[in-house]
Image: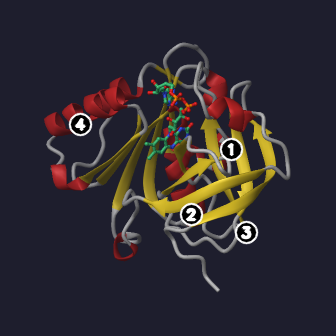
Amino acid sequence: MEILTDQKTISKVLDVRYITENTFVLRIERNRIKFDPGQHMVIGFPGEMENREYSIYSSVKDDFIEFLIKEVDDGKLSKRLKLVESGTELQIQGPYGYFVIPEHDKNKQEYVFVASGTGIAPFHSMIMSNPELNYQLLHGIRKYNEAYDSNHYPIEKHNVCVSQDSGNYYYGRVTQYLKEKKFPVDAVYYLCGNSSMIDEVLDILHEKGVDAQNIRTEVYF
Ligand SMILES: Cc1cc2nc3c(=O)[nH]c(=O)nc-3n(C[C@H](O)[C@H](O)[C@H](O)COP(=O)(O)OP(=O)(O)OC[C@H]3O[C@@H](n4cnc5c(N)ncnc54)[C@H](O)[C@@H]3O)c2cc1C
């Protein structure tokens, strides 16, 4: 029996993997939930009203579901999720959203994925689910250690932009990188993360002549 996509379900925590002091990968039971890479789910504690959206981080091929979550200072839910232990029950709803790659476009199109911070989560799911995708991934972060699971992406497709640390990566904001480098005008652009990055990228893409129909956005906050 498949679980209906909109149904609430209880899933147990299987693991919490810390990538940095305040960012972690939360792995839960999949419970036969079907999703398309790029979709998100709504997570809360059973019997409570407070819940939040989180993009699915894992691949459709995995028999668990993962989320990449950053603990927000003074945040109500992310702080509690960071502290859950294996076996804790969470209430899961979804999947939701249209920030996905249409099946018929997957092998035809070139994609440019632009993320800030944990906004890389839906792209990780898309790429792990479809490693053959023709894409460039741009990831804007402040510190080096926020290049989450950078070894999961081929180096030639993964463009990390670090704004507050110097070292081997591009030094500067992802918006600056996009302005400076050449990207195909006819690619499909997917943008995910905070609204100020997305607004700025929309302006840059407009200036570069990218058709608005070829841009998809997912705003986190
Ligand atoms: C479709 C969608 C998908 C999302 N996917 C993810 C995801 O994969 N990973 C993830 O970590 N978050 C994701 N978020 C954000 C998430 O839903 C929560 O907003 C976030 O975890 C803060 O919740 P909180 O209860 O801890 O903080 P709250 O008590 O709700 O809010 C505290 C404040 O923090 C701000 N805020 C929210 N997120 C951030 C952030 N990342 N950095 C700085 N400030 C922030 C809010 O605007 C608010 O002002 C997503 C949001 C949406 C709408």
The residue tagged 2 is: 131
Q: Which residue is mark 3?
A: 63
Alpha carbon distance from label 4 to label 2: 26 Å
Residue type marked 4: Leu
Q: Nearer the viewer, residue 154 or 206?
A: 206
Dot 4 or dot 2: first in sequence order is 2
**Which residue is identified by label 1?**
151
Give the residue type at disc 2: Pro
At a point 74% along the width and 24% down the height, the residue shown is: 21
* Front: mark 2 or 3: 3
Q: Quadrant of the N terminus?
A: bottom right
Decide: few, some or many residues near mark 1? Use Cα within 10 Å; few <14, some 14-19, many ≥20: few
Instruction: Name the residue beneath numbered marker 4.
Output: 202
Q: What amino acid does circle 3 point to?
A: Asp
Give the crowd class for mark 2: few <14, some 14-19, many >=20 residues within 10 Å. Answer: few
Q: Are marks 1 and 3 in contact (CB under 8 Å)?
A: no
